[in-house]
Amino acid sequence: MEVLMAKTAGFCFGVNRALNIASDTVLENNGRVYTLGPLIHNQQVQAKLAEKGIEEITSLTDIEQGTLIIRSHGVGPSILEQAIDSGLNVIDATCPFVSKIHVYADELVKEGFYVVVVGDGAHPEVRGIIGWTGGEAVVVEDAAQAGELSLATGKVGVIAQTTQEQKNFASVVQTLKEAGKEIKVYNTICNATAERQQSALELAGQVEVMVVVGGFNSSNTRKLVDICRNIGKTTYHVETADDLNPVWFRGIKKTGLTAGASTPDWIIEEVRGRMSDIDELAGNEGISEEEVVITEEEKEEAAVEVSENTTEEQGVESSEEFSEETTEDQAQESSEETTENLSVEEPSGEETVAAVAEEEEEEDAAGAEEGMEDTVEVKSLRQGEIVKGVVVHISQDEVMVDVGAKSEGIIPLRELSCCDVSSPQDIVKIGDEIEVCIIKAEDNEGKLILSKEKADAEKAWDSLDEALNSENTVKGIVREVVKGGLLVDVGARAFLPASLVERGYVEDLSVYLGQEINARVIEINRGRKKIILSRKAVLEEEYARTRQDMLDNLQEGQVVNGTVRRLTQFGAFVDIGGVDGLLHISEMSWYRISHPSEVVKVGDEIDIKVLKVDRDSEKISLGLKQVLPNPWDTVDEKYPVGDIITAKVVRLAPFGAFVQLEPGVEGLVHISHLADRHVAKPDEVVTEGENVSVKVLSVDKNEKRVRLSIREVAKEQVQPEEPETVEYQQMESPEPEASEESFTIGDRLGDLGNLFDKDNN
């Protein structure tokens, strides 16, 4: 019997990464180490982890202190917060692809989308994803369930469990689209999963029987089984070599072998070796195809044996939150499918089974754990080659990348970017797919050394040459401030002179650090690795384009919003959308000001009116007071004729004094109304800045004139003296004698009579 191995089988990098993290944690940690639920869905691997001292728990309440490893399936944010609040040292071994799904789920909820997860609602990965939606997501397994959804919102975001079949995911998306929903789709099926499923499908088409190795409670392994069975291929699901039954292979010439993502190489190799041994034993005993006859009882016995193994493994109790179970119905279904797929005519295999059992006892355990280099496809890498990889780990001085080789490659910090960086997280994140250049296929320590900087530069030079010739803009991130300008990462290291950063002078270049900018390539020399950029050229073009659009569409009388850019003695220049207009000092206020800073300051956002547009000279005149209330509109109501008010003297003129009633409203006190006497100059009576009482004589709001009087106020304030009264007492005595105090009218008038005489003269 020929045993063919699937091109892609066994551990994915996410599972391998989780196991490496767990092993490193045990070596570095002196305390107890725990995993919340099984680190991966494989009992044999879990047993080895337990031997290393890693304990599996089902609830955070089971422990009080120590180190907690979050398994590759990930958890919701509430569990992470609970673990940290409990004082546990948390090590996150979540698969980078799963972590990316968490980010998508969180973003969809914040954007108002109702999240639909395509997957198994009982799977811990899916439960973790639901946690990142605040528990609001709905889970569907197929298009039929998607068609039954009654969603309250028209905005639906769709994401997938990493182990989903591409065809099933696509059918769910199509069903939701046909329901008329506004849909946003993130295809989060893991590439490794899709490749493994495709590889299994292709192999199943070439063989008579398929054997799938993996945990009975492993979701991705069960999907491999379903894929093979769905095309009508006899398929057996085993967890270890002990689950193999010799009768399955009687009369079979070609058998296919694949494994789930949670299956280690040593188990796969053990199963393959046992399958080969079964074939050899059958051959040594001289059993021919014609002699192979199997009874109905043996068929049923073999099927029941597998069914019982599956049921036994899946029946182990675990917490509701952290375990997956295959129900008895699933076990029965597996049993029925196994029974249906057995050959009808084969002989008893009791002697063969006994021989195999004896052979199993004599196997060397160490040999069973040998690598799968000759059965699993491994990339052959050459120095200078550029390949794609996924970031799986980030430390302070290096980044670990899975490029499909025997081991992960290392990018030293100096090879991460063309410019100096203080932290690798500024350049890449776990789960990012990047291109890297092979510097050394294997160094002195057997490590694979990579360079992102060289791969980026190789790809960048061609695009930079094209940008120079076509005058297209390029995007880059400012990494450093150096003497005379900025260093920009455009895939290669480029220099942006300080004079070409903005349209005007820039005092502090550090504000651009970390920013993504658009610039024009103005000089390039590949031999000297010299690239000169100009951001000013891009800004000038944008300004000219915006200015022309504004001039074409701007209308006189239009009220627009603008930002004050600079002040002068005669006014302020205001940016009204890429174009500067002049706000003259005389148009700033209804009252007189001596400097624009009394009304506006640089950076103010104001509503202004377009007074005039000169398209030939590209000049725009603006007005601020025109959008403010005009105090003259209500001056007659505020200051009725005859009212006496207090006002401030603001200016003196030869013919009188101007008095401010309120900002923007001034009245005139004529020189003849300054006092009740002759006044030669106004400053004989009043001074600038003095507060005086004035009487309103007349108001003409159309002509903007108010006549005031100080003299009239003075007249009203003079009160006439009360005449002296003398009381006389009626006396019955004879007429009194003249007193020494008796007087005449002339005596009373006194000097007043002389005054009249003078006036008459």
Image: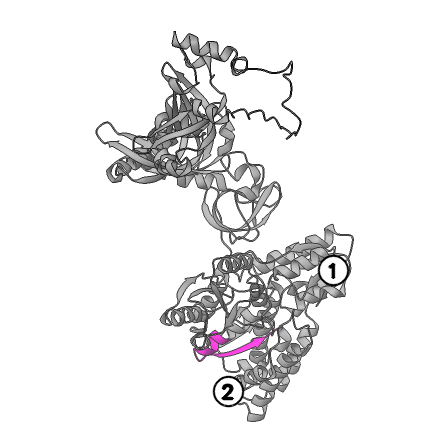
Q: Is 357 situated left or right of 282 in this image?
A: right
Which residue: 57% across, 42% down?
424
Residue 122 or 501: which is nearer the viewer?
501
In the rendered image, the vertical position of residue 302 relative to residue 263, given as above or below: below
Residue 405 placement (x, y as % from top left):
53, 52
Q: Disc 2 or 1, which lies upstream in sequence?
A: 1
In the rendered image, the vertical position of residue 8 relative to residue 555, given as above or below: below
Which residue: 41% across, 13% down?
678
- Is any atom of residue 624 visible in this view? no
The numbered mark at residue 52 is 1
Secondary structure at numbered mark 1: loop
Name the amino acid type tagged 1: Lys
Q: Nearer the viewer, mark 2 or mark 1?
A: 1
Q: Is 634 situated left or right of 370 in this image?
A: left
Which residues fall within the magenta stretch?
226-239
- Residue position marked by numbered label 2 in the rendering: 340
Quadrant in the picture for residue 449: top right
Specify whether residue 228 is painted magenta. yes
Q: Residue furthest front?
A: 734
Specify whether residue 159 is painted magenta. no
In the rendered image, the vertical position of residue 63 relative to residue 700, given as above or below: below
Which residue: 38% across, 18% down?
672
Name the amino acid type tagged 2: Glu
Quadrant in the picture for residue 535: top left
Residue 730 or 754: which is nearer the viewer?
730
Decide: few, some or many residues near mark 1? Use Cα within 10 Å; few <14, some 14-19, many ≥20. Answer: some
Residue 48 placement (x, y as % from top left):
70, 64
Residue 349 placement (x, y as % from top left):
60, 86
Secondary structure at numbered mark 2: helix
Contact, mark 2 vs mark 1 (Cβ under 8 Å): no
